[in-house]
């Protein structure tokens, strides 16, 4: 009896161990709202770009299915005044899951590591310890969450297009957040 159970378990493990996931790679272009609670930047929306991948171990045309999702994007905001300028660059790395619902609508959510660079420069007259041309640069990483929703349309067996919106939130001393909306093109391997 132990032999039969061992053979069934070995057969199950062997059949799942050689099952390679199908991969969908995509590229996106998106607009990002001005981040809230990061300082004096209240600029107009930023435009960013990114790459992403879906890993699907159950490569079937199911109506509802879940896949693993990872993507890397880049957004930059800047603000300039008569006496100061500042820029904020964020590179969010997202890891999570995407759940496809009927009609190719999907919801996704996961954790996001926001790698950011805040740079400011004072260009005004002498004031206290600030002199003309003084600048500062700060780098930081924050862990956050990023839920989203979107739609994907299958152009062919291998090519997809779609649109997505995502909310990004992280703690940077206090809660900071921004929204993104964009379009993507994907290729299924």
Image (spheres, rainbow, N blue to C red):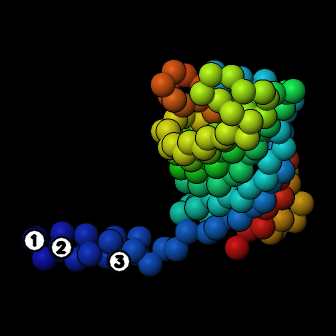
Quadrant containing the C terminus in the rendered view: bottom right
Determine the residue positioned at 64% across, 67% down. Answer: 23
Give the answer, above or below, for where 14 lies relative to 122: below
| Badge 3: residue crowd in 10 Å (few <14, some 14–19, many ≥20) | few
Q: Are marks 1 and 3 in contact (CB under 8 Å)?
A: no
- The answer for how far apart the CA atoms under marks 1 and 2 are is 6 Å
Give whichever of 131, 73 is nearer the camera: 131
Left or right: 154 with respect to 174?
right
Q: Residue furthest right?
A: 155
Quadrant containing the N terminus in the rendered view: bottom left
Q: Earlier in the sequence, mark 1 or mark 3?
A: 1
| Badge 2: residue crowd in 10 Å (few <14, some 14–19, many ≥20) | few
Give whichever of 94, 8 is nearer the camera: 94
Nearer mark to the viewer, of 1 and 3: 3
Q: Which residue is mark 1?
A: 2
Residue 110: x, y in percent? 53, 40
Determine the residue positioned at 78% across, 67% down. Answer: 187
Q: Splitting the image into 4 quarters, where does residue 80 fall? A: top right
Q: Residue furthest left?
A: 2
Q: Which residue is mark 3?
A: 14
Q: Which residue is mark 2?
A: 6
Give whichever of 75, 52 is nearer the camera: 75
Determine the residue positioned at 69% across, 44% down. Answer: 89
- The answer for how far apart the CA atoms under marks 2 and 3 are is 12 Å
Give whichever of 71, 79 is nearer the camera: 79
Q: Are marks 1 and 2 in contact (CB under 8 Å)?
A: yes
């Amino acid at each position: 009896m132990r032999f039969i159970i061992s053979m069934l378990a070995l057969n199950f493990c062997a059949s799942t161990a050689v099952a390679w996931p199908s991969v969908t790679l995509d590229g996106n272009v998106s607009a990002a709202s001005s981040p809230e609670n990061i300082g004096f930047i209240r600029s107009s929306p930023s435009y960013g770009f990114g790459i992403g991948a879906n890993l699907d171990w159950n490569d079937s045309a199911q109506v509802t299915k879940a896949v693993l999702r990872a993507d890397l994007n880049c957004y930059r905001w800047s603000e300039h005044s008569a006496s100061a300028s500042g820029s904020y660059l964020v590179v969010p790395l997202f890891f999570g899951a995407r759940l496809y619902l009927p009609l190719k609508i999907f919801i996704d959510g996961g954790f996001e590591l926001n790698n950011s660079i805040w740079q400011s420069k004072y260009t005004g007259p002498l004031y206290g310890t600030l002199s003309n041309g003084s600048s500062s640069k700060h780098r930081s990483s924050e862990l956050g969450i990023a839920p989203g929703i979107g739609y994907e349309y299958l152009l062919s067996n291998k090519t997809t297009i779609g649109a997505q919106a995502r909310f990004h939130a992280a703690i940077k001393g206090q809660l900071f957040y921004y929204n993104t909306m964009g379009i993507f093109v994907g290729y299924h391997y």
